Image (cartoon, rainbow, N blue to C red):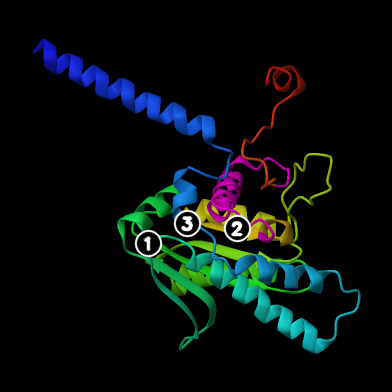
């Protein structure tokens, strides 16, 4: 019995030591569950470079805007193709609406993923809208995706995502210094939809998209934005920092 207790103790000690070793080499993007589940496609950086060149144009032509729309869809496709456990990825016009991207998974890896993303039990699919426009996603556009998830995809889909260049109306701006304390427009609809259904619809902007060539980035971005639907922090979600801090001064000074 004593030998068995000693063996069990050694196993626990070795396990904790292994976790400590992982933490010591962890730079916030590697050696995590998220980096295993999202290993970005090698083609993503080249596509992001093209998107950046498009954004920097002052007056793109109609043809250039159309090509940029296709480019954004390609980036989104490559990003989701990089997820472990993916079993289905579709873009099609159904008997009803057009789906930019509908993603499904059935493997053990996908089960881990949808739990990380706070998705409801058995609602394992993700629906994506890509909006490569100069304007923010409007409340009306947000309402359309809410309707798709509540009516067309109610039993199977647990997460909706907008990939945009400018974000959506009512959401905190990147350069906003004051904490936003009121809900309006698409941000208000996001909160109401989540309260009604328990499901999340989130919005990524260009700054989020330019992080997608990093291991774990897609999952880390999604997790933080999903959490903030309930937190309602009133601040934009910073995607590049591995450790989130939102503290008053008397607590923030205690972080080394």
Disc number placed over residue 85 in the picture, else none: 1
Circles 3 and 2, Cβ within 8 Å, touching? The answer is no
Identify whether 10 is placed above or below 167. above
Name the disc covering residue 197, or none.
Answer: 3
Question: Helix, strand or loop at disc 3?
Answer: helix
| Label 1 environment density (alpha carbons within 10 Å; few <14, some 14–19, many ≥20) | some
Numbered disc total: 3
Which of marks 2 and 3 precedes in the sequence?
3
Residue 212, image x, y percentages = 62, 59
Q: Residue pushed farthest left?
A: 1
Q: Is residue 81 above or below residue 232?
A: below
Tag 2, which secondary structure?
strand
Q: Nearer the viewer, mark 3 or mark 1?
A: 1
User: What span is in magenta?
Assistant: 209-236
- Towards the viewer: 232 or 251: 251
Kindly report the distance in space between the C-alpha atoms of the residues bearing marks 3 and 2: 14 Å
Q: Position of residue 176 (x, y in %)?
A: 83, 46
Q: Nearer the viewer, residue 19 or 232?
A: 19
Disc 1, SS: loop
Q: Residue sitting at 57 percent across and 66 percent down?
A: 42
> Is the residue marked by circle 3 packed among few (<14), some (14-19), or many (20+) residues within 10 Å?
some
Question: Residue placed at 53% from the left, 34% from the top?
Answer: 25
Give coordinates of residue 130: x percent, y percent. Answer: 63, 72
Q: CA distance from mark 1 to mark 2?
A: 22 Å
Q: Where is mark 2, residue-wise?
A: 202
Which is nearer the N-term, disc 1 or disc 2? 1
Marks 1 and 2 in Cβ contact (< 8 Å) = no
């Amino acid at each position: 019995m004593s030998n068995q207790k000693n063996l069990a103790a050694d196993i626990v000690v070795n396990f904790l030591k292994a976790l400590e070793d992982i933490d010591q080499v962890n730079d916030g993007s590697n050696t995590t569950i998220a980096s295993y589940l999202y290993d970005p496609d090698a083609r993503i950086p080249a596509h992001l470079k093209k998107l950046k060149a498009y954004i920097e144009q002052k007056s793109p032509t109609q043809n250039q805007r159309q090509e940029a729309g296709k480019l954004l869809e390609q980036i989104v496709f490559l990003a989701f193709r990089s997820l472990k456990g993916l079993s289905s990825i579709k873009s099609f016009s159904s008997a009803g609406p057009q789906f930019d991207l509908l993603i499904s998974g059935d493997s053990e890896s996908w089960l881990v993923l949808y739990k990380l993303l706070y998705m409801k039990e058995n609602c394992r699919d993700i629906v994506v809208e890509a909006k490569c426009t100069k304007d923010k996603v409007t409340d009306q556009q947000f309402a359309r995706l809410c309707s798709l998830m509540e009516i067309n995809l109610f039993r199977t889909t647990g997460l909706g995502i907008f990939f945009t260049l400018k974000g959506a109306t009512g959401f905190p701006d990147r350069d906003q210094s004051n904490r936003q304390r009121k809900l309006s427009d698409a941000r208000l609809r996001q909160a109401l939809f989540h309260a009604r259904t328990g499901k999340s619809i989130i919005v990524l902007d260009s700054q989020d998209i330019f992080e997608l060539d990093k291991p774990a980035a897609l999952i880390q971005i999604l997790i933080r934005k999903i959490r903030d639907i309930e937190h309602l922090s009133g601040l934009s979600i910073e995607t590049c920092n591995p450790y989130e801090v939102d503290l008053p001064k008397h607590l923030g000074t205690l972080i080394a």
